[in-house]
Image (spheres, rainbow, N blue to C red):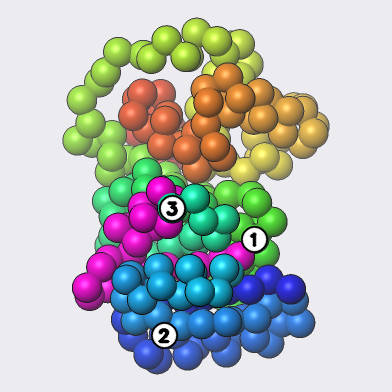
Amino acid sequence: MIRAVVADDQAVVRGGLRLILETQDDIEVVGEAADGAAALELVRELDPDVVLMDIRMPEMDGIEATRRLALSGSSARVLVLTTYGLDEYVYEALKAGAAGFLIKTDSPERLVEAVRVVAGGESLLAPEVTRRLIDRFLAGARPGAAPPELEELTSRELEVLKLVASGLSNAEIAETLFVSDGTVKTHVSSILSKLGLRDRVQAVVFAYECSLVEPGHASA
């Protein structure tokens, strides 16, 4: 059973998310919070698997709550809920340690699948938002020197990292490179290991900051 906490300052939104999630036999909403501080307290008390975290909340916003959860060593995975107008906050949330993000207007089916994916230890990056996020970030980013860790990657691994940063799924990368899904997973695991990164989300943030993706390519 996947145990979830829903954190959003709007009671109607929390109720709607609970209603959607609890139609599933394998998901239970064990608590609701109206702000980040309350969400942290619930996580300490209830030890959920997933926290659905809104970004804009009173007292403590979702970014700071996500950062504190990551620093606390909690095993709870954070799924950030966002809207199209909050790209810059999404980027900060990913840096803070979120496992992924989901658009609030996505379908109930996608919400349920997102919770399962994140609870299973994977990362969730909605491709359409990832591409816009890259464009927004790179538009104001200053090119920096490539970190030495990049030299550890093979040319194919560097290619895979760029595709991951462009918002492509493993299946899409496999199709692009004419290899199997298993081969892509192996490359991604090797990339994370060589760069000392926790998960796919951190790999995307790393790629943003190294300016590995050209805006034109990201929005293709």
Amino acid marked by disc 3: Ser
Q: For the residue labelled by badge 1, is the local secondary structure a helix, a strand or a loop?
A: helix
Amino acid marked by disc 2: Val
Is disc 2 surrounded by few (<14), some (14 to 19) or many (20+) residues within 10 Å? some
Q: Residue at x 58, y 19 (%)?
A: 194
The alpha-carbon separation of the residues under discs 1 and 3 comes to 18 Å
Of the numbered discs in the image, which one, if any, rests on residue 119?
A: 1
Q: For the residue labelled by badge 2, is the local secondary structure a helix, a strand or a loop?
A: helix
Decide: is 16 above or below 200. Answer: below
Q: Nearer the viewer, residue 178 or 68?
A: 68
Q: Between label 1 and label 3, give the one nearer the viewer.
A: 3
Q: For the residue labelled by badge 3, is the local secondary structure a helix, a strand or a loop?
A: helix
Horizontal arrangement in the rendering, residue 23 relative to residue 136 (left or right): right
Decide: is 198 above or below 67. Answer: above
Is disc 1 surrounded by few (<14), some (14 to 19) or many (20+) residues within 10 Å? many
**Residue 191 appears in the picture as rendered:** yes
Mark 1 and mark 3 in contact? Answer it, CB < 8 Å.
Answer: no
| Mark found first going from the N terminus, 1 or 3 | 3
Which residue, as the protein is rendered here, is positioned at the far front? 45
Asked where in the image residue 22 lies, by quadrant, the reply is: bottom right
Residue under label 3, please give it: 72
Of the numbered discs in the image, which one, if any, rests on residue 13?
A: 2
The alpha-carbon separation of the residues under discs 1 and 2 comes to 21 Å
**Residue 128 appears in the picture as rendered:** no
Name the spot of residue 64 as percent of width and height, x first: 30, 58
Name the spot of residue 76 as percent of width and height, x first: 55, 60
Q: Residue at x 36, y 23 (%)?
A: 210
Amino acid marked by disc 1: Ala
Mark 1 and mark 2 in contact? Answer it, CB < 8 Å.
Answer: no
* Quadrant holding the N terminus: bottom right
Name the spot of residue 129 as percent of width and height, x first: 42, 53
- Residue range corresponding to the magenta coloring: 49-71
